[in-house]
Image (tube, coloured by chain):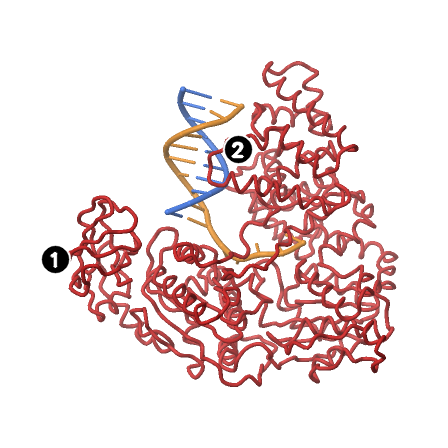
Chain colours: A red, B orange, C blue
Amino acid sequence: MPDVPAPRISDLARAGPPPGAYLDGLNPEQRRAVEATEGPVLVLAGAGTGKTRVLTTRLAHILASGKARPWELLAVTFTNKAAREMRHRITAIIGEQAEGLRWLGTFHSIAAQILRRHAEIVGLRSNYTIIDVDDQERLIKQLLEAENIDAKRWTPRHLAGLIDHWKNRGWTPDRLPPAEGSHFANNRGQALYKLYQDRLAVLNACDFGDLLLHNLTIFTTRPDVLAEFHDRFRYILVDEYQDTNVAQYLWLRLLAQKRQNVCCVGDDDQSIYGWRGAEVDNILRFERDFPGAEVIRLERNYRSTEHILAAASGLIAANKGRLGKTLWTEETGGTKVQVRGVWDGEAESRMIADEIERAHRAGRRYRDIAILVRASFQMRAFEERFVLLQVPYTVVGGPRFFERAEIRDAHAYLRLVQSEDDDLAFERIVNTPKRGIGDTTVSRLLQVARASGLSASRAAREIVQADELPARTRTALSNFLRDMDRWRAAREATAHPQLLETILEESGYTDALRLDKGPTSQTRLENLKELVQSMGAFDTLEAYLEHVSLVMDLDREAGEDAVQIMTLHSAKGLEFPLVFLPGWEEGVFPSQRSIDEKGEKGLEEERRLAYVGLTRAREEARVSFVANRQVYGRWTSQLPSRFVDELPLANVEASSETGYYGGGPGMNEAKSRWDDAPSFGASSYSSPGWKRAQQRGFSPAARNTVIEGEGRLVAVSEPSAGRYGVGERVFHQKFGYGRVTAVEGNKLSVAFDKAGDKKVIDTFVEKG
DNA sequence: TGGGGGCACCTTTTT
DNA sequence: GGTGCCCCCA
């Protein structure tokens, strides 16, 4: 997208330009997608075709042409980030009028608002709490225990997953197809689902899936309420439509059915969330569900160079069941997609890190470089390498701030202060930090609570009064209750960040962390500090807790110049000048599990993931694969991904600077020969890669063996030792960098920078 | 009650 | 290989 800042309407009004000037700079298709406001519209927006610009301009256009007022627009996204981005960009066009966009947000936040208004219809009160996955699993665990179901064989996580799946499909317990519940605990799935929902109702709580599901119940049982929303929402806009699940789809269809002014924007080729319930079919059948729908294709790509685009398009062409788009660009030329094969994961990370250093020296900023991996276990090799070379990097994703144990503990304290009857919060912290109230006491307490219909806190009071606990436990419990009461009393008079600080200090939570010698305790303390700070931005404790449950992460400033390491999934929607795509090996990418579980469908989703990866690149994309990879500590031999061979030859350049492979397309020809590659007993290196290694002059014996080691000096046997000179820097896969101190026949003595010890290892020494 | 050892697990992720 | 969980023992 050429970077023409869109003019603000307020500016235009002042300067008196012709109305509609914000449409300038749009190409014909984009313009049509903006102006086709009446009736159903499906915008098929390929990668890099200016989708967000179209979305925001369309909203601005509806407002500017007076067709609707801000609060009459419903605009849904999947992530908070996307919602923020959209609001930000609309504000840039129309100014403060954008503040009136009350119904711009994620599916869940909008559903939560609707549910707050009509909670009573589904048996909740409007101050219901939204529980997260952790609470969900603990609740289910209790249910399983109460029902005497073996939680080893039937894990809470499993049932939580099933329930989530059912909710994504729009099934309430009474609407669940009988076959669905039969897979869990001898046909008790449905009954357990019902019990779970009942329990949530008692707690006045709901989980994420419920937000949408309860909305569906409200809309279908109360036509009057639905009609109210039909009146309200004149225009509906949906981003990332290919990622909608059945429940979201039904929700949209219900809301859109009257006015039909619904515009869905998406790309079937970028549907990568099938495993969590997204239905590509929703996009494929749009025209059937909304007869007379206009379909607009955005095919001009403003992001990538010709070769990158052609490589990505060639790859995705192997998928069946696409709506089909032909992306094109005026950016001719550019570099071809690089494809390289290397020996193993460490060689791969070394190669990529070297190239990043080179690119940086040549003037490329670190932040313009991204490494996109299939799974997070692949990240570690890069992190280790970057730490060693002192290359700044950030890992995007990872454990979310609000999901960290210490943060949730803090929240549990706050929730319990806020509402004494929050049993889930009570259970979480009654013995955190350890205060001598063990499992026996807690389960006894819960038993009393259940028997008498009291909340856990109230039951605890009863038990303390009843004087039936051992003295020590009784004191501990009554101290805890006394503390809670004190904090509750302090609540009115104390600002909520201070309240949390007080609680953390007085409960002994921070002290326990300070005493903890674990590697993470320092970070945890810092996280808690950050938490206390972030609370200041909210007026009340209620407002803060509400925010936390829907927005599961903090806004972090992204100003720092660092290489971005992330999964392909979290890269969607982003772009970088230089993109590395490591680990293109069968089984890793495409992921074996994906293929095993979903067959051809799974494979196609993996291919879309590859497509997403390639299309993130503006200028350069570099794919790599290895012959040997350690997965969970085990050496495995790898074949290049089929996706490597699916890249069109004309747009690819294969090389083997560092590797043992010729690499690149066509190299799978060698596959048949690899099948009879020698196997060396139980050796980790029974891989087909040996063939190549041999061709490069390494024999199996070249697996060097550390035969001696004392402090930092070790000798290794290495047939090609003659290639090394005394004083030369070498890199050893196990010991890192070192310097050659002597060469004697096949023996290489090396002083390593870090200590090594006597140990037989089976890796190569390479020149480093 | 809670610490330590043995053992099974192990994609992708948002809300 | 690293981690989280369960069980057993002190």
Q: Secondary structure at mark 1?
A: strand
Amino acid of disc 2: Arg
Decide: marks 1, 2 in contact (CB < 8 A)? no
A732, above or below A529, in the image: below
The CA distance from mark 1 to mark 2 is: 53 Å
Q: Is residue A234 left or right of residue A303?
A: right
**Residue A533: where, in percent of width, then height?**
66, 44
Front one among A280 and A756: A756
Q: Please identify the quarter of the rendering in which residue A558 is found.
A: bottom right
Q: Quadrant of the C terminus of chain A?
A: bottom left
**Residue A81: where, in percent of width, then height?**
66, 60
Tell me if mark 2 has few (under 14), some (14-19) or many (20+) residues whose alpha carbon lies within 10 angstroms of its own: some
Q: Is residue A642 left or right of residue A759?
A: right
A633, above or below A290, in the image: above
Amino acid of disc 1: Glu
Q: Secondary structure at mark 2?
A: helix
Q: Are marks 1 and 2 on the same chain?
A: yes
C10, above or below A700, in the image: above
Which of the two discs, 1 and 2, labels the residue nearer the N terminus?
Answer: 2
Checking the image for residue A744, the label placed there is 1
Front one among A506 and A457: A506
Tell me if mark 1 has few (under 14), some (14-19) or many (20+) residues whose alpha carbon lies within 10 angstroms of its own: few
**Residue A526: where, in percent of width, then height?**
57, 42
Q: Quadrant of the N terminus of chain A?
A: bottom right
**Residue A9: where, in percent of width, then height?**
81, 73
Front one among A293 and A464: A464
Which residue matches tag 2? A514
